[in-house]
Amino acid sequence: MSSAQRLEWRPSFYARGGGVVGDIITLLHPPYTAWHLSYVALGAAAAPEVHGNRVGFALLAFFLAVGIGAHAFDELHGRPLRTRLSRRALAVMGALALVAATGIGVAGILTVSLTLTPLVAFGTWICVAYNLELFGGRFHNDAWFALAWGAFPALTGYWANALTITAGGALVTIGCAALSVAQRRLSTPARLLRRKTVTVSGEQRLSDGTSIELSQAGLLGPLDGALKACSIAITLLAAGLLAVRL
């Protein structure tokens, strides 16, 4: 299979074949799921006091809601990853994962603080509204992506431990939103190249007269490379900072 054919077949750099198991791995978006879970850890690590049990349950809730629920609903709406999982399987996976995540949130409300209520309610709502593109896709855009998948996990990780907000927590929250903007700026053109581009033609002329032929692989390589590096770097950074605090 040629490079062009591989790019056409794989809807993302982490997509796998191999039947149901491969489809499930693809559905989980491993690099991106780890990236967004890192925001929870970064928020928690910035708190004045870190509670290991709260961090653990927050990470589990976000893994269920984002890693499984949101991605199952996203695949249900338009099949962007081209998995062969049935619509019923996707709907059941998404619903059960979201219910379980919400259940963890409710337990947190009852055992930690009632102030977690707005966070739990928002998380449940945005998971459905964003990924199923409700209200005509009004909440499915770059700004809501940064808010829902960048700022919100960081704020939740911080608040669950501090039960208040400080300048430090606010800065970490804004920083994670900015990282999500950067992710979106890289992933959007990468998806366009992988999923919708049929051919690429043309050349790039340099000031010294050199000419570089444009290609799908050549344009996609730096984007995928940056996304891979960022997902690894942010995951390691969050794990390291959380380990120091715990």
Image (spheres, rainbow, N blue to C red):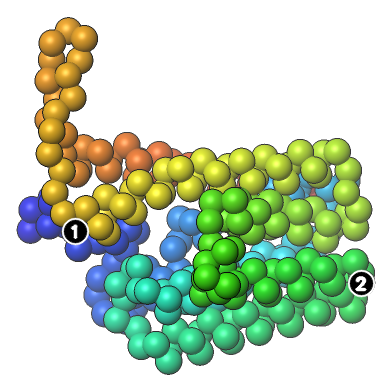
Q: Residues within 10 Å of mark 2 (few under 14, many from 20)?
A: few
Rendering coords of residue 101 (x, y %): 67, 77
Say which residue label 2 marks. Answer: 114
Element at label 1: helix
Q: Is residue 192 left or right of residue 134?
A: left
Q: Farthest residue toward the top?
A: 208
Rendering coords of residue 229 (x, y %): 43, 41
Between the C-alphas of marks 2 and 1, the distance is: 49 Å
Element at label 2: helix
Vertical arrangement, residue 130 with respect to residue 206, above or below: below
Rendering coords of residue 170 (x, y %): 80, 43
* Residue 243 in sight in this render: no
Say which of 54 and 204 sits in front: 204
Q: Which mark is residue 44?
A: none
Say which residue label 1 marks. Answer: 8
Q: Farthest residue toward the bottom?
A: 88
Could you tell me which residue is drawn at 76 percent across and 73 percent down? Answer: 121
Identify residue type, mark 2.
Answer: Leu
Rendering coords of residue 192 (x, y %): 31, 52
Identify residue type, mark 1.
Answer: Glu
Could you tell me which residue is drawn at 74 percent across and 50 percent down? Answer: 43
Q: Residues within 10 Å of mark 1 (few under 14, many from 20)?
A: some
* Residue 32 in sight in this render: yes
Q: The N terminus appears in which quarter of the rendering?
A: bottom left
Could you tell me which residue is drawn at 86 percent across and 38 percent down? Answer: 167
Answer with mark 2 or mark 1, whichever residue precedes in sequence: 1
Figure disc tally: 2
Vertical arrangement, residue 235 with respect to residue 103, above or below: above
